Amino acid sequence: MVELLSPGGNFISLRAALVNGADSVYIGLKDNNMRTNTSNFSLEDIKKASQIAKQYSSKIYLCTNTIMKDEDIELIENYLPIFKEAEVDALIVSDIGLADLAIENGLEVHISVQENISNIKTLKTLKKLGVKRAILSRELNIHEIEKIANYSPIETEVFIHGAMCMAISGRCFLSYGLYNKSANCGECLQPCRKQWKLTIAQDVDSDFYEELEDSAFLLEKSNENSYKSNFLSPFDMAMIEHIPELMDTGVDAFKIEGRARSPDYVATASRVYKEAIKSYESGNYIFKQEWVNDLKKVFNRGFDTGFYFKQPYKTGGDNKSEFIKKDIAKVVNYYSKIKVAELQIWEDLAIGDEIVIQGKTTGSINHVIKSMEIDGVAIDYCEKGRNVAIAINEKVRPNDFVYKLIKR
């Protein structure tokens, strides 16, 4: 069976991943992972996260995969016994020295995609070091992945969904050059996602010199064989339509990117890919278009298949989700016996509205309003500023956040 590995940027996303079928969740150690701009987990949080994962018979992997200087290695070395005591199932690292130290301390080690693993020889070398798994380079095609997986002496893992980077395995210097924030130390501010201008530099003595009112311009056309201003920002990878081909590669784990994304993204991506994997493993695989439709409802930059079948060429900087989330309410109480939640709303709510409820223990739940009451009287519409009861089977909790999905 293939392992589904989902992102956990905070406790809400962690729970969202686990509730929706993730076999394992990868989280970041504060200040020492490739997404330092997200909430991340303190040393105290890591033990709690591990305990939560084990309630679902799932695993916790801890990312410590930034560039490591001597002082960073010394700091993490002191933490290794704490990770072991917290029952972290594996460390995801990109530094070979740290990998060696972690193995010496009895921890399982997975080598990060930052190492751009692209050949069998490297995997054999990692085996000698005691490494358990390697996340393969995102720049490999599906045939190269299948060959490597079939001959690898250690477990292999690949990304199947989420953001793609303009640089090879994320080794980018753009953020550091512009903002002094290093992508390789987890501080990327993603200038590649912005709109860019092209400026024409001309030689006045050239035969091709042309007077221009403005030598800088945005490239805005967006159809085939044309250009856009977001030409440094790739589409997201989405392999949901190619689960059989992925399964046939023999890779051990499928990874969803997105520790910086919202809990509803994590919940949806985890659920959709888990359903697709189970469908294949049942022996009666049937592709469902609703899988794609659901993925389009949460944050995305448009979908492509990365390097799996061709060199990616599609670009898009903005969120292409068909819906936006509007903060409309909080949960006041949940009555388990009658399966009713009381909401305090500050935006209007109506029968048929789709809402998202999120909380540390709740995770992320999508729910369509089918029944509402105020003081025991059924209603179809409720104006803002009221408390309203809604019927919902899933347990939610006081102070959970409530959002309404609004079609763009």
Image (spheres, rainbow, N blue to C red):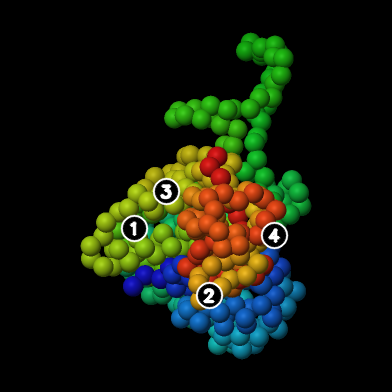
Q: Amino acid at mark 3?
A: Asn
In front of the other: label 4 or label 2? Answer: 2
Give the Cα separation between the discs numbered 4 and 3. 29 Å
Mark closer to the chain start, 4 or 2: 4
Check disc 2 and report its element: helix, strand or loop.
loop
Mark closer to the chain start, 4 or 3: 4
Check disc 3 and report its element: helix, strand or loop.
helix
**Is 238 situated above or below 93?**
above
Q: Which residue is mark 3?
A: 293
Residue 87 locus on image (x, y percent): 56, 85
In front of the other: label 3 or label 1? Answer: 3
Q: Which residue is mark 4?
A: 37
**From where the camera sits, is residue 275 visible?**
yes
Q: Which residue is mark 1?
A: 243
- Evaluate if marks 3 and 1 touch, with contact meaning CB atoms under 8 Å apart: no
- Evaluate if marks 4 and 3 touch, with contact meaning CB atoms under 8 Å apart: no
In percent of the image, x 71 and y 68: which residue is there?
A: 31
Give the Cα separation between the discs numbered 4 and 2. 37 Å
Give the Cα separation between the discs numbered 3 and 1. 16 Å
Q: Amino acid at mark 1?
A: Ile
**From where the camera sits, is residue 119 visible?**
no
Q: Amino acid at mark 4?
A: Asn
| Viewer-closest of 226 and 261 | 261
In percent of the image, x 69 and y 70: which residue is there?
A: 30
Mark closer to the chain start, 3 or 2: 3
Q: Which residue is mark 2?
A: 336
Residue 38 locus on image (x, y percent): 67, 62
In front of the other: label 2 or label 1? Answer: 2
Check disc 4 and report its element: helix, strand or loop.
loop
Give the Cα separation between the discs numbered 3 and 2. 32 Å
Give the Cα separation between the discs numbered 2 and 1. 38 Å
Mark closer to the chain start, 2 or 1: 1
